[in-house]
């Protein structure tokens, strides 16, 4: 089927298909399940953003992180140890 927003061709049929799909997603519980998964992903994303903001907000922490980055780049410490040291700064 052809759809055109410019001429309106097929738009009513397309909209009905969208509504039917939405009804089926709601009836099966799939929409609610996806929404729950999305909420959890948003939670973790927001937590990561806040943790990074806390690290960036403190000048002394920024300086320590710069030093740790240099140590990782030079191979003096492992990325895992660096991550642990930075995470400890959040305590």
Image (tube, helix red, strand yellow):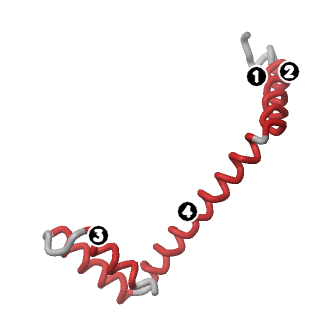
**Residue 5: assigned label:** 1
Quarter of the image with the N terminus is top right
Q: 62 or 78, which is in the foreground?
A: 78
- Find the distance from the CA under tag 2 to the CA under tag 3: 56 Å
Secondary structure beneath label 1: loop
Relative to 2, is 41 on the left or the right?
left
- Residue sitting at x 73%, y 40%: 30
Above-or-below relation of 4 to 75: above
User: Alpha-carbon distance for marks 3 and 1?
Assistant: 53 Å
Q: Earlier in the sequence, mark 2 or mark 4?
A: 2
Q: Earlier in the sequence, mark 1 or mark 4?
A: 1
Q: Which residue is mark 2?
A: 12
Residue 52 on image: x %, y %: 46, 73
Residue 27, how many percent across, how many down?
Answer: 84, 36
Examine the rendered structure and indicate whether residue 20 appears above or below residue 13: below
The CA distance from mark 1 to mark 4 is: 36 Å
Which of the numbered marks, if any, corresponds to residue 45?
4
Label 3, on which residue?
80
Q: At x 24% / y 80%, what residue is drawn?
A: 67
Mark 3 vs mark 4: which is more N-terminal?
4
| Real-space CA distance between mark 2 and mark 4, rounded to the nearest whole angstrom | 38 Å
Q: Viewer-nearest of labels 1 and 4?
A: 4
In primary-sequence order, the first of circles 3 and 1 is: 1
Which numbered circle lies on residue 40?
A: none
Callout 4: few (<14), some (14-19), or many (20+) C-alpha neighbours within 10 Å? few
Q: Position of residue 48 (x, y in %)?
A: 51, 68
């Amino acid at each position: 089927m052809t759809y055109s927003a410019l001429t309106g061709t097929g738009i009513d049929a397309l909209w009905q298909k969208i509504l039917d799909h939405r009804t089926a997603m709601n009836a099966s519980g799939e929409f609610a399940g996806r929404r729950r998964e999305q909420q959890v992903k948003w939670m973790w994303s927001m937590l990561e953003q806040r943790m990074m903001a806390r690290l960036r907000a403190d000048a002394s922490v920024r300086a320590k992180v710069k030093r740790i980055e240099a140590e990782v780049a030079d191979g003096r410490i492992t990325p895992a140890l660096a991550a642990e040291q930075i995470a400890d700064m959040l305590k």
